[in-house]
Amino acid sequence: MTTNDGPSGRVALITGAASGIGFAALDALAAAGWRVAAIDRNEATLDKLRQRAAGSAALHVAACDVCDEAAVTAVVSDVVKRFGRIDGVVNSAGIGADIPALDTPVDLFRRILDVNVIGSFIVARAVARVIKEGGNGGAIVNMASISGLRGSKGRVAYGASKGAVVTMTQVLANDLAEFGIRVNAIAPGPIETPMVAKLHSKEDRELYMRYMPMARYGTPAEIASAVVFLLDGSVSGFITGEILAVDGGYRGAGIISGRK
């Protein structure tokens, strides 16, 4: 069996591609020579992608709710018809909340788990089946979070979902290795995305600055660089089952000198 040994002509499917980290991943992969299938459920934000895709042979755009198994199956089939293959997937679609545990509605908890965990699984499984059938190997990158590695306030649902993504990534890496499919996750720290802009108050930002050696929020482009690395088997071909924290040093920090 051959493996994914470089980006030239390869095809990646990105969920949550219309904004934030997903949109940055689209830009980075396109710049690296990948053809991209961009999916999102937000019709309003998809319009800018459709305009960009007009006349492009390297970009396919589709509306899809990752929690809808039938819709995901149909979109994946359409991507294969258009590009002839899929070599990688970036599970960037996700939702979050910052609510104290005792105030968290059960319905909201279920919805966050459904999108962040079940949705990621549905997409990963659908694409993995295509990659297995192709016989050339490939890669899956899931989006976890430092909230899935440490217990942050107000993240009882979001943190639980991202912790599940961490374990799911490791199990998928184990189960899919025999088919030449590598599975890794990125655990971003605070990143300047539309979701973070809604969730993080001024006080939240001040708290993060106390515990981050790099003393700043990251950018979507910095996460996208890690996505490109993990998808490209020519540079990360022996990496699977890993959770890469891209967090400005937050996870590993202890007492920070000179920081109030």
Image (cartoon, rainbow, N blue to C red):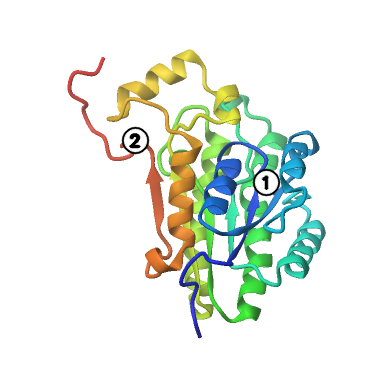
Mark 2 secondary-structure assignment: loop
- Tell me if mark 2 has few (under 14), some (14-19) or many (20+) residues whose alpha carbon lies within 10 angstroms of its own: many
Residue drawn 50% across and 59% down? Answer: 169
Where 223 falls versus 233 (above or below)? Answer: above
Foreground label between 1 and 2: 2
Report the side of 142 relative to 70 (left or right): left
Q: Amino acid at mark 1?
A: Val
Read off the residue under disc 1: 115
Residue at the extreme bottom of the image, as rendered: 1
Residue closest to the eye, 30 or 91: 30
Read off the residue under disc 2: 248
Report the side of 186 relative to 76 (left or right): left
Report the side of 236 relative to 78 (left or right): left
Q: Position of residue 152 (x, y in %)?
A: 44, 32
Quarter of the image holding residue 82? bottom right
Residue closest to the eye, 128 or 253: 128
Quarter of the image holding residue 76? bottom right
Residue drawn 46% across and 72% down? Answer: 5
Q: Position of residue 32 (x, y in %)?
A: 51, 55
Residue closest to the eye, 65 or 98: 65
Q: Position of residue 255 (x, y in %)?
A: 21, 28
Q: Which mark is residue 30?
A: none
Q: Quadrant of the C terminus?
A: top left
Q: Position of residue 258 (x, y in %)?
A: 18, 18
Where 47 falls versus 174 (above or below)? Answer: above
